[in-house]
Amino acid sequence: MEEGHEDQETKLDTDLDEETLFVVSQTFKALGDPTRIRILHLLFHDEYSVNQIAETLHLRQSTVSHQLRFLKNLRLVKNRRDGTTLYYSHDDEHVMNLLKQAIDHANHS
């Protein structure tokens, strides 16, 4: 390994505080679940209500609500109210780009 490269890796390791480590691990945890990936992939293109997500992805409404709550706590999705309906959309372009790259990687032959 080149000396400059090793120094750069060591610097990166020391720059990670506990909060950063936690947020990064939670982000990867969010992306490690097939249902959450499907929801985020859907929200990449448009906003949807819980019912619309459930219908489109053939999931139970309670499952969608649970997963959206998890994603909202991580600030990966946001919602807006229109009357009595909440519409969800993605809230983190960085994570959406990471997801897109992972999907592109998986589809690369």
Image (tube, helix red, strand yellow):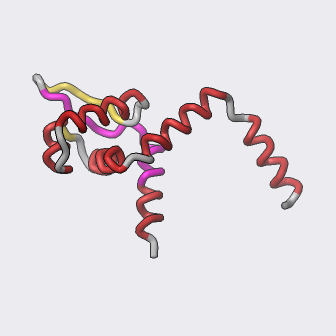
Residue 70 image position (x, y, % from top left): 36, 31
Asked if residue 80 lies left or right of residue 16, the reply is left
Q: In screen coordinates, is 34 left or right of 22? A: left
Magenta residue span? 85-99
Q: Quadrant of residue 78?
A: top left
Reply yes or no: does residue 86 show up in magenta. Answer: yes
Left or right placement of residue 104 versus residue 3 in this view: left
Left or right: 66, with 109 as reference point: left
* Relative image position of residue 48 (x, y in whole percent): 20, 40
- What's the residue at 39%, 27% (across, down)? 73
Where is 64 relative to 44, above or below?
above
Residue 36 in which image quadrant: top left
Q: Seen from this angle, which residue lies furthest bottom? A: 109
Residue at image point 41% right, 31% down: 75
Residue 52 in picture, x, y percent from top left = 15, 42
- Residue at left 43%, top 46%? 31
Residue 63: image location, x then y, percent: 24, 37
Q: Nearer the viewer, residue 100 or 57?
A: 57
Residue located 14% across and 27% down the image: 82
- For the N terminus, give its image quadrant: bottom right
| Placement of the C terminus among the 4 image quadrants | bottom left
